Image (spheres, helix red, strand yellow):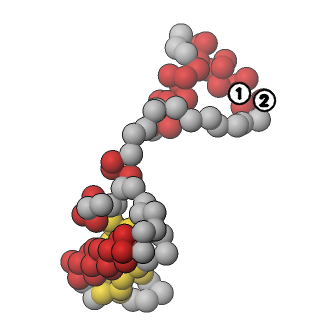
Amino acid sequence: MNSEHYTYRVTWSPEDNEHIGLCVEFPSLSWLATSPEAALTGIRQVVREVVSDMQANQEAVPQPLAEKHYSGEFRVRIPPEIHRSLAMQAAEQGISLNRLASAKLAG
C-alpha cells in the first residue's frame, strides 16, 4: 500500500494555535506543527509508520479513497413531502428526478 495515495489535508486549529495535518482514511491520526508544510510532512510520516506497522502485524490496511471504485449510486431516504416536491420540480423542468437530485448535490 502506497501511503502517498491517501487523502491528506491541512487546516488551522484555533484550539491548538497551530496547523493540523489530517488523513481522511485514518481519522484518529493528526499532526500539529507551526507551518502547513510541517503539518503535512508530519501526518504523512505518521501514516507511513502506521501502515508499515499494520502490514507487519498482518492487519487490514485502509484502501486510499482515490483508489476505490465508485458506482455512482447511493440511496438517500427523505420524507415523502420532500420526495413529492422534488418530483414536481423535476417534472416542471422536464428532467428526471435523478438529474435534478444530482444537480442539487453538485451545486
Q: Is residue 85 above or below residue 58?
A: above
Which residue lies under the disc numbered 1? 83
Which residue lies under the disc numbered 2? 80
Q: Secondary structure at mark 2?
A: helix
Comparing 62 with 40, the one in front is: 62
Q: Residue 70 appears at what percent x and percent y?
A: 43, 38
* Left or right of residue 9, residue 106 in this image: right
Task: Bin the neighbour count of mark 2 within 10 Å (Cα to Cα): few under 14, some 14-19, many 20 and up.
Answer: few
**Who's the residue at 58% across and 20% down the image?**
97
**Who's the residue at 50% across and 37% down the image?**
105
Q: Rounded to the nearest whole Å, what is the CA distance between mark 1 and mark 2? A: 5 Å
Q: Amino acid at mark 2?
A: Pro
Task: Bin the neighbour count of mark 1 within 10 Å (Cα to Cα): few under 14, some 14-19, many 20 and up.
Answer: few
Q: Residue furthest top?
A: 94
* Residue 87 seen anywhere in this rendered image of the structure: yes
**Who's the residue at 36% across and 56% down the image?**
64
Q: Amino acid at mark 1?
A: His
Quadrant position of the C terminus in the picture: top left
Q: Are marks 1 and 2 in contact (CB under 8 Å)?
A: yes
Comparing 74 with 48, the one in front is: 48
Q: Place residue 17 in its image quadrant.
A: bottom left
Q: Place residue 21 in its image quadrant.
A: bottom left
Comparing 36 with 46, the one in front is: 46
Q: Which mark is residue 15?
A: none
Q: Is residue 22 above or below residue 77?
A: below
Q: Is residue 96 above or below residue 55?
A: above
* Residue 50 seen anywhere in this rendered image of the structure: no
Q: Is residue 8 above or below residue 82?
A: below
Comparing 58 with 8, the one in front is: 58
Q: Residue 41 appears at what percent x and percent y?
A: 23, 78
* Left or right of residue 15, residue 46 in this image: left
Q: Secondary structure at mark 1?
A: helix
